[in-house]
Amino acid sequence: MFEALTRLFTKSEEPLATREPRLAVAALLVHLAAVDGSIKDQERRAIKEALEAFYGLDEHAVEKLVAEAARRDADAVDFYQFTSALSALTEDERIAIIKMMWQVVFADDKNHELEDNMVWRIAELIGVSNRQRTVLRNQMSRQRR
């Protein structure tokens, strides 16, 4: 019994991004949609469409993923558990994450300063250059016009 208790309390919690990158990405997208104070229907759709397209998920799987992501985001105190291992993904995958974030930002045809700041911070944390982040921002902005 003592060994079971010891294992329970000494078990190191692996960051979420290491265990399940798509859950980490979904949690970041959910947080981004809510960072300006409310989640609009267009932002919800953008999250679902981005996750369906990038991960090849069906609608039911995306709904389940987003629900779990929202729960994880509500429990999170910072972005570390979501971004810690995402920087180990390929450059193309990391760029795709930032692109998805810009899709959510521009889904409601507005770019709130808190959204912009969050994309900047996440890009820095996962190793996407300022230049690439700005290029993606401009591309996504033009697509929405």
Image (spheres, helix red, strand yellow):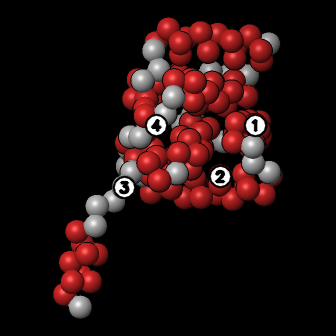
Left or right placement of residue 88 versus residue 50 in this view: left
The crowd level at tag 1 (other Cα within 10 Å; few <14, some 14-19, many 20+) is: few
Cα distance between the residues tagged 1 and 2: 14 Å
Occupied quadrant, residue 105: top right
Mark toward the start of the polypeptide (1 vs 2): 1
Q: Examine the rendered structure and indicate whether residue 19 appears above or below residue 92.
A: below
**Circle 2: element type:** helix
Amino acid at the residue labelled 3: Glu
The crowd level at tag 4 (other Cα within 10 Å; few <14, some 14-19, many 20+) is: many
Give the labeled residue for mark 4: 86
Residue appearing at x 64%, y 10% in the figure: 138
**Circle 1: element type:** helix
Mark toward the start of the polypeptide (2 vs 3): 3
Residue 66, which numbered label?
2
Mark toward the start of the polypeptide (4 vs 1): 1
Give the labeled residue for mark 3: 14
